Image (cartoon, rainbow, N blue to C red):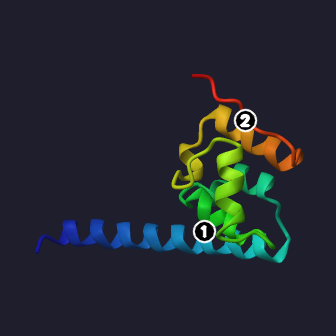
Amino acid sequence: MNPRLVAVKREAGKKGARSNQDAAAVKRDLRAGHLTLSQVLDDPRAASVPLFDLCLAVPRWGRRSVPRFLDRVDVRSNVRVRELTTGQLERLRLGLANPGFRARRQW
């Protein structure tokens, strides 16, 4: 096998492992209460984490409450943090700050 290709694969593996470790650290901090979900949305370490997984790491949020919240703010559950649009980020923050907030769909 080409030594250059092996080096590229090794670097890609290291980058992936680093990303996984960063994501685990963010979820650990969120679960422990050191960070809020609003803060995590701005954290570059959480860019590759699906939004549903981040919400599950919030204390007292479970598999039933997370889909309800995401539906209320009109954001897909399988989107990664880096894929969120500015409108989605705004609706998420409004939904976190105001429990009665409900996104109005513009058809």
Q: Nearer the viewer, residue 44 or 107?
A: 107
Label 2: few (<14), some (14–19) or many (≥20) C-alpha neighbours in 10 Å: some
Q: Quadrant of the N terminus?
A: bottom left
Residue in the picture at 23% in, 72% down: 6
Residue 23 shows which numbered tag? 1
Q: Is residue 79 left or right of residue 34?
A: left
Residue 107 location (% of width, % of height): 57, 22
Tag 1's secondary structure? helix
Residue in the picture at 68% in, 69% down: 56
Disc 2 target residue = 103
The quarter of the picture where residue 89 lies is top right
* Residue furthest left as drawn: 1
Residue in the picture at 53% in, 58% down: 48
Q: Is residue 5 left or right of residue 66?
A: left
The quarter of the picture where residue 55 lies is bottom right
Residue 10 location (% of width, % of height): 33, 73
Query: Of label 1 and label 2, which has the lower sequence position?
Result: 1
Q: Is residue 78 left or right of residue 59?
A: left
- Rendered view: 27 above or below 87: below
